[in-house]
Image (cartoon, coloured by chain):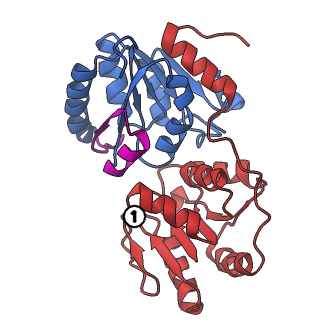
Chain colours: A blue, B red
Amino acid sequence: MSPRKPRLLALASGGGHWVQLQRLRPAFESFDTAYVSMFDSYAEQVAGSRYYVIPDASRFDLKSFLPVAFKAVAILLKERPRAIVTTGSAPMLAFILLGRLMGARTLWVDSIANSERMSTSGRLARKLAHRVVSQWPEVAAREGVECWGAVV
Amino acid sequence: MIFASVGSMLPFDRFVQAVDEWAAQNPQEEVFIQIGEGAYEPRHAPFVRMMPHQEYRRRLEECTLFVAHVGMGSILQGLEIRKQMLLMPRRAELKEHTTDHQLHTADRFRHTPGLMIVDDVPALHAAMTRLLAEPLAPSEGISPHAQPALIAKVADFLRTGRTIRN
């Protein structure tokens, strides 16, 4: 770990969201990156980086965000990231909101699975994150966000 | 060996039961299923609810046919290792997901080499049998990383808060 590099928090739910985040890793090279997801077994994929596990939350159940929010505060206070990037899903909105309040630059990359319309979480992220991008040009145009390309 | 998986998040009982039925009709074939949080437990094939990522990757690499939902995690990992894939989308009307985005993903990836997408259980059964006998031509594979343009723009935004122009 180089103390000179700014810190980045890279977040994704388990499964496809995490696979997409892994495909973005070359973009994190100038940062000291810590990762957040939902399964212990992912730690090996990011060996050498700090890795935190959080519980899942559903956008249909506001109460389920509370444990995530507590965990998010603890991780954010510990990491003090300069920037936060996520490929979703809903629970990561807690990090975007709280991280932004703590001064981090925040980026939401909407999942490539949302090829017709942006995810509900992505639409919420438009109000919370500094920048939201879609991986599909047509969706980006329709939703008023940018498309920077795709994970594949 | 067939490795079937519903992914990591939601139940997909229609899929698990379909694979189990095929396993019952084809006892000579080895089938292993990751069933997630589903209520239906297979009776004709060994299964786990969720396996550690390393074991998942090993089973994916060792199988001759990967059968899954139309999840981007499944598609990307299958393409990365050029494994033939047979995929059936979850449907929101059957409460298999919150939206029909897997039908949209199915439309987008239906013609991608190295994978086959089926719409229902009879087609899944037929394709399982056929792809073991006549495997799909392998895909050309994909880079392990996102498109360079996306990586450059994400890197620049995270560093500077600005977007570079092409």
**x, y percentage for residue A108?**
49, 26
Based on the displayed image, in which of its 4 quarters is residue B142 positioned? top right
Q: Residue at x 32, y 19 (%)?
A: A99
Q: Amino acid at mark 1?
A: Gly
Based on the displayed image, in which of its 4 quarters is residue A125 positioned? top left
Q: Is residue B73 above or below residue B145?
A: below
Q: Is residue A48 magenta?
A: yes
Q: Which residue occupies the extreme front position in the image?
A: A2
- Look at the image and give the residue range highlighted in magenta: A40-61
Q: Chain of mark 1?
A: B
**x, y percentage for residue A81?**
34, 17
Q: Is residue B111 above or below residue B124?
A: above
Q: Residue at x 49, y 76 (%)?
A: B32
The residue labelled by disc 1 is: B36
Judged left or right of residue B11, residue B2 is: right
Q: Residues within 10 Å of mark 1 (few under 14, many from 20)?
A: many
Q: Residue at x 41, y 75 (%)?
A: B47
User: Nearest the camera: B161 or A133?
Assistant: B161
Mark yes or no: residue A44 visible: yes
Judged left or right of residue A152, residue A28 is: left
The number of discs equals: 1
**x, y percentage for residue A41?**
35, 51
User: Nearest the camera: B109 or A23?
Assistant: A23
